[in-house]
Image: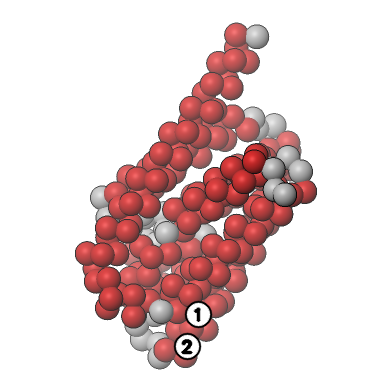
Amino acid sequence: MIPFESLEFLFLCLSTFISLVNPLGMAPLFLVLTERFDPIERIGIAKKGTFTATIILIISALVGTYIFKFYSLTVDAFRIMGGIIFFRTGLRMLEAKISRGRSTPKETEEGLESDDIAVSPIGIPVIAGPGAITASMILSVDAHNVMDYGILIFTIIFTMVLTFFIFRGADKLSERFGTTGLRIIQRIMGILLMVIAVQFVINGVTAVLMNIVK
């Protein structure tokens, strides 16, 4: 039986990564970046891109705690900073805009000129953007036992598998939902991400104030 605290952590990890990666919202961008490739090549790009993002996020999750210790950073400060980044990303999603941190015009142009765009910009920063990398580091600190670390790794892999299948069928999704439908989903994910961001900031500020009072 999974403890209730672990179930809460599972829901937090899933909602955070799915909102930040936003595979449905990024599907149109994936189509644009891979429009000159045939369907078979596009599937290969999606597979390599999600694999690259998986490795980056798992490494970030595993070394997050050590980075905090090495640079003498407090978790609360990182939570506040992460909350601000998440809120900004969520606001852009709510306004149906693609964050410049995910893919700038220059990065897109350079990626299209490259023979292999799967690693960059597809893997980084379209899938594993700054927000997702930050989230993996923050959530790794909240993992208190082996089960929590297992949940964190599982949610990263689950999100990447989900992203792969969505990118694989991006053309069909675009036809079925249309631009308007994808934008609506992106806005819903943006609202959810903004709520998570506010909670991160509240937790960080509360911990800082309690330390000051002590």
Find out whether the residues at labels 2 and 1 contact each other: C-beta distance under 8 Å.
yes
Figure quadrant of residue 139: top right
Look at label 1 and name its amino acid: Ile
Residue 199 coordinates in the image, percent (x, y): 47, 33
Q: Amino acid at mark 2?
A: Glu
On screen, 66 above or below 150?
Answer: above
Whole-angstrom CA distance, mark 2 to mark 1, is: 6 Å
Q: Tell me the residue at 60%/71% (across/down).
A: 51
Q: Quadrant of the C terminus?
A: top right
Q: Is residue 14 visible?
A: yes
Q: Relative to 181, does residue 76 appear above or below in the rendering?
A: above
Q: Is residue 180 left or right of residue 6?
A: left
From the viewer's perspective, tell me whether residue 29 is left or right of residue 140.
left
The label shown at residue 41 is 2
Return the residue nearer the eye: 179 or 128: 179
Q: Pinpoint residue 113: horizontal percent, then vertical percent.
A: 41, 79
Q: Please name the residue shown 71% across and 54% down the image.
A: 150
Residue picked out by circle 1: 45
